[in-house]
Image (cartoon, rainbow, N blue to C red):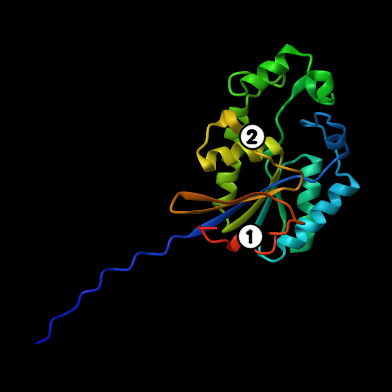
Amino acid sequence: MGAVTRRAPTQPERAVRTILLLRHGETEWNRARRVMGHENVPLSAAGRAQCERMGELLSRWPLDRIVSSPLERARQSAEIIAARLGVEVAVDERLAEVRFGRWQGKTYSEIIAEPEYHEFLKDPIGSPTPGGETIRDVQRRGLAAIEEGSAQAERTLFVSHGDIVRSAICHFLAIPLAEFRRIRVDNCGLTAITEAGGRPEVKFVNLLADSDRAWDPLHWSTAT
């Protein structure tokens, strides 16, 4: 009687989820270097065009879900992209911009003389803004929204704000949050993270729709 060959049981394939993080398109306040915070500032014409191009880029890969900050500039960005993709937009308050308090509406050249602003620049984790938030607070609420939102779909786009995106990237790359300002996130810059078995992999950061390498970013190998 011949020997029986036993095969090792196959491991179940790990589900891969894709998390896409997008900063909203440009506004006139961005150009004026004015602190927006929770002010409902609409997209500029240039910002709308950025989102149209991003919608065209993202149309190459089906999205299951779009979740947006409630603020107008993010919501408009999400809606422009959603119209191109045929996906509904959900809103999550936790994706909103930092609460800047009395700095809101001022230009950076106006607040640079304030000692409180320099404390926030020097120690963003220990020193809150006049609105009462540290960057750690912002990261916690942003990550909670991203975790819950991405658990409901295989591929989710989160449309938010620069500091939400930067602080989330710090988490996924396991780098100190105090270094968040060293991460460049432009208006309508796209970041992609894939996650399988609890292991995140950052595919790219701050991809722009008119980038020379925008042709197939979500299919880059882990070696790329």
In this figure, which residue is indicated by the disc labeled 1? 217
Hey, which residue is sitting farthest top in the picture? Answer: 115
Residue that badge 2 annotates: 182
Sequence order check, earlier mark of 1 and 2: 2
In the rendered image, the residue lying farthest to the right is: 45
- From the top left corner, tell me how far across and down residue 109 is, in percent: 83, 22
Q: Label 1 amino acid?
A: Pro
Q: Quadrant of the N terminus?
A: bottom left
Identify the residue at horizontal 52%, vertical 51% (top origin).
201
Dots 1 and 2: beta carbons under 8 Å?
A: no
Pick the residue in front: 113 or 87.
113
Residue at the bottom extreme of this rendering: 1
Q: Secondary structure at mark 1?
A: helix
Closer to the camera in the image, 22 or 143: 22
In the displayed structure, 12 sits above or below 95; it is: below
Where does residue 27 sit, x and y in percent of width and height?
85, 40
The foreground one among 174 and 130 is 174
131 or 59, which lies in front? 59
Give the answer, above or below, for where 110 lies relative to 160.
Answer: above
* Residue occupying the far left of the picture: 1
Q: Is residue 157 above or below residue 56?
A: above
Mark 2: few/some/many CA within 10 Å (<14, 14-19, 20+) = few
Q: Position of residue 62 (x, y in %)?
A: 66, 64
Tell me the kind of residue under disc 2: Arg
- Give neighbour class at mark 1: few <14, some 14-19, many 20+ (Cα, 10 Å): some
Specify the quadrant that holds the C terminus: bottom right
Q: Looking at the image, can residue 45 be seen?
A: yes
Q: Left or right of 66: which side holds 16?
A: left
Give the Cα separation between the discs numbered 1 and 2: 22 Å
Identify the residue at horizontal 68%, vertical 59% (top origin).
213
Q: Position of residue 212 (x, y in %)?
A: 72, 59
